[in-house]
Image: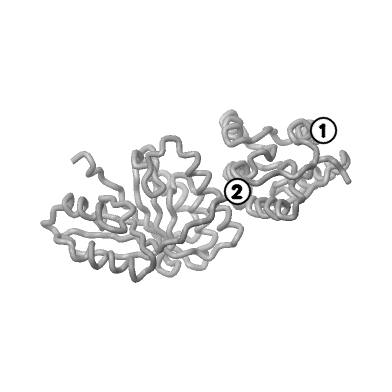
Amino acid sequence: MSTQPRVLIVDDEAALRRQVMMGLAQHGFEVEECEEGLSALSKLKSAESKQNPFGCVILDVRLPDIDGLKILSVIKSIYSELPVVVITGYGNEDTINTVQSHGGSVYLDKPFEVDDLVHHIRRIAPKAEPRPRRKVATEPHVLTSGLVFVRGAKDADLYDIYSKLYLADGVCYCDPVLGDWDIVLLIQARNRKSLQQIVNTHIQSLDGVEACEVHYCEKPAISRELEEFIQDYEKVQAMNNPDGDTMGGRNIRKATSYAILDVDPGKLSSLYMRLYFTDNVVHCDVTDGGKEIILLLQGISTQEIQNTIRNEIRMIPGVLRIKQLNTLNFSSK
């Protein structure tokens, strides 16, 4: 049995994978391949469960499903000691710094010599031996979530309504907004019946509320691999939050907007994946039977968010219409 570490090559270029596999095999390495990030995570977890873990990963930055640097973050959060060689044909100084900050062991520009790759693998990866996996805490019971859009009467005191809703039972966060609605809330409860009771008791009956609209958050039909990746990725994001100044998974110091997307339900799975991992997107909620997706976006400025919506989100196939609601700041009143 070879004492060389088992290697997993993750790249969407079949010719490059074949070249690397043949080159490493000639040096005594056992190599497996995959072309997508989610498949790579699945292989890593399967190998771990079979007590035959990989000793090194070769990971491309540009993958067809998930950005390679996001995959790197999740790999290092679960397998902290697993060496990862990051490769790309489109790198620059910023890419190198990002790879290092995400825990990458080695950075190589394409094209590279297999002998150089072998040298780095032997330097960073010990001889084949099991690698411990970080224990993950049991997930708590999943609550039902809903986004509620509230419109005040013409003569209503919106700040008074906002102040009361902000402290209401079940409200996770509450934002005054500009647009067709005046206030957006995220509420959570044990089930839809309990959530609707919150709406009836604490929102619809409030003086000054003219109308409200409830959008129940639904679980999208996505693959098990993607669902597991999202769970791991959210844990990484929580651990990497630099200042802890968050509420409901978002940074309350940043510019915030909501985007209400009418979408093609037939493209929901691919749409959800693209939108969830778009820069500036904090939350991505599917509602109304897959006909609508509501995004919570944050950035250093409203202009940055608008650029994301105009230049990225609007261009994704399956996005039919977009309404944007920018938040206001009542906190200083």
Q: Secondary structure at mark 1?
A: helix
Of the pair 128 and 153, the residue shown nearer to us: 128
Q: Answer yes or no: do the residues labelled 1 and 2 have beta carbons within 8 Å?
A: no
Q: Is residue 234 left or right of residue 321?
A: right
Residue 174 pos. (x, y %): 29, 52
Residue 108, image x, y percentages? 70, 33
- Residue hosting label 2: 135
Question: Residue 97 location in percent, x, y?
Answer: 58, 30
Q: Which mark is residue 13?
A: none
Mark 2: amino acid: Lys
| 303 left or right, relative to 176 | right
Q: Which residue is mark 1?
A: 115
- Please name the residue shown 64% across and 35% down the image: 104
Is residue 62 in view? no
Alpha carbon distance from label 1 to label 2: 36 Å
Number of callouts: 2
Name the spot of residue 212 as percent of width and height, x first: 25, 64
Q: Secondary structure at mark 2?
A: loop
Could you tell me the amino acid type at mark 1?
Asp
For the question of whether residue 225 can be seen, the reply is yes
Image point 16% across, 52% down: which residue? 160
Image quarter (top left, top right, bottom left or bottom right) of the C terminus: top left
